[in-house]
Amino acid sequence: MPYRWRLIAGVLGVGLLTWLVLGFVHSRINSGWQSELQSIADGARAAKLKNPSAYSISLSLVMGEILPRPRWTRAEVDQLTELIQKATALPDAGRLDNPTPISETDAGILSAGRFALTAISTRFSADAPIDPDARAALLIILENALRSGTPRIRHTAVASVADSGLAEASGPLRAALEAAQDDPDPQVASNAKRQLEAVDKNRRRAGR
């Protein structure tokens, strides 16, 4: 299951999530990127209605409002960059092994940054319209996130790059994802290994 659906599952519940995933698959087969992203946006908004927490509010903002816009420009890049920068400013709260519960405020900030990365990945995988200069900036954002000082952001970036389809070919993102296998955080490193194996398996299956 792509990482974006696992994030939504945390607040939506398995039953409603399954219904939305089936709708997503149907839309992808029949209607292209607009219905695909709208299905995800519907799930994000449903999560907020079901449980209006800091997590679901961040989910609704990024995946429900920003993700399905008709075309991404520098405006979306700037908005997503701000969310990611705020999240990376919380290195302690963003530890994967943090023994101390983080505040509701910090949870919302971290979630928004993680969802921003997931939205970028989803936009690329759906081949939805992105202005050329915005596309170039988004690639840099993903690469920089793999080297973030916040482990939870790196962990999300690994899955986001893998899900985007951008790591199938050689290039800076593929190299950064391979380097993440040696990440100092063992959870990030193991995730990178697992995601690369999945990327290569999908590529072989598709004959690429």
Image (spheres, grey):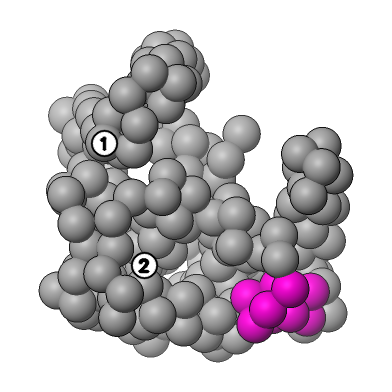
Based on the displayed image, in which of its 4 quarters is residue 172 positioned?
bottom right
Magenta segment: 170-180
Q: Main secondary structure of the magenta part?
A: helix
Badge nearest the viewer, 2 or 1? 1
Which mark identifies residue 34? 1
Which mark identifies residue 75? none
Q: Per the image, is 174 magenta?
A: yes
Image vertical order of residue 93 relative to residue 190, above or below: below
Marks 2/1 in contact by CB < 8 Å: the verdict is no
Left or right relative to 190: residue 135:
left
| Residue furthest front as drawn | 207
Q: Which residue is mark 2?
A: 113
Can I make out residue 38 in this image? yes
Where is residue 101? Give x, y as percent: 47, 61
For the residues labelled 2 and 1, the Cα–Cα distance comes to: 23 Å
Please state which of residues 137 and 101 is positioned toward the viewer in this rendering: 137
Please state which of residues 131 and 64 is positioned toward the viewer in this rendering: 131
Left or right relative to 42: residue 25:
right
> Considering the image in quadrants, where does the N terminus appear?
top right
Mark 2 Cα-neighbour bin, 10 Å: few <14, some 14–19, many ≥20: many
Mark 1 Cα-neighbour bin, 10 Å: few <14, some 14–19, many ≥20: some
Which residue is rendered at x = 59% and y = 73% of the image? 154
What amino acid does circle 2 point to?
Gly
Which residue is rendered at x = 46% and y = 83% of the image? 140
Where is residue 138? Give x, y as percent: 39, 75
What amino acid does circle 1 point to?
Gln
Left or right relative to 167: residue 64:
left
